[in-house]
Image: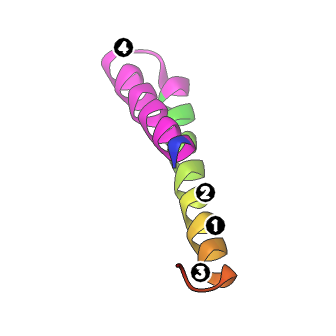
Amino acid sequence: MVLFLILLIAGIALVAIGAAVDGIPYVISIGVLLLIVDLLYLAARSIWRSTRGPAR
């Protein structure tokens, strides 16, 4: 869960910095890609957790 939060904060920060500073579109694209990877990580983790069995 810590990795998810770190990736989420980093992605949001990169998008905000890229939007605030004009002329840095690659920072926005890196931030968006990082957010997409973060969502994929969350989906994979939830699928993996649901196939392991019931929670105690």
Asked if disc 1 and disc 4 are in contact, CB closer than 8 Å, the reply is no
User: Looking at the image, do the residues carrying marks 4 and 2 touch, with CB atoms under 8 Å apart?
Assistant: no
Q: Which residue is mark 4?
A: 21
Three-letter residue code for mark 1? Ala
Q: Which residue is mark 3?
A: 50
Element at badge 2?
helix
Residue 6 on image: x %, y % = 50, 35
CA separation, marks 3 and 1? 10 Å
Residue 24 on the magenta span: yes
Of marks 4 and 2, the one in the foreground: 2
Give the mark nearest the N terminus, 3 or 4. Answer: 4
Q: Which residue is mark 2?
A: 41
| N-term-proximal mark, 3 vs 2 | 2
Total labels drawn: 4
| Cβ–Cβ under 8 Å for marks 1 and 2 | yes
The residue sitting at 52% across, 57% down in the picture is 39
Residue furthest to the left in view is 20
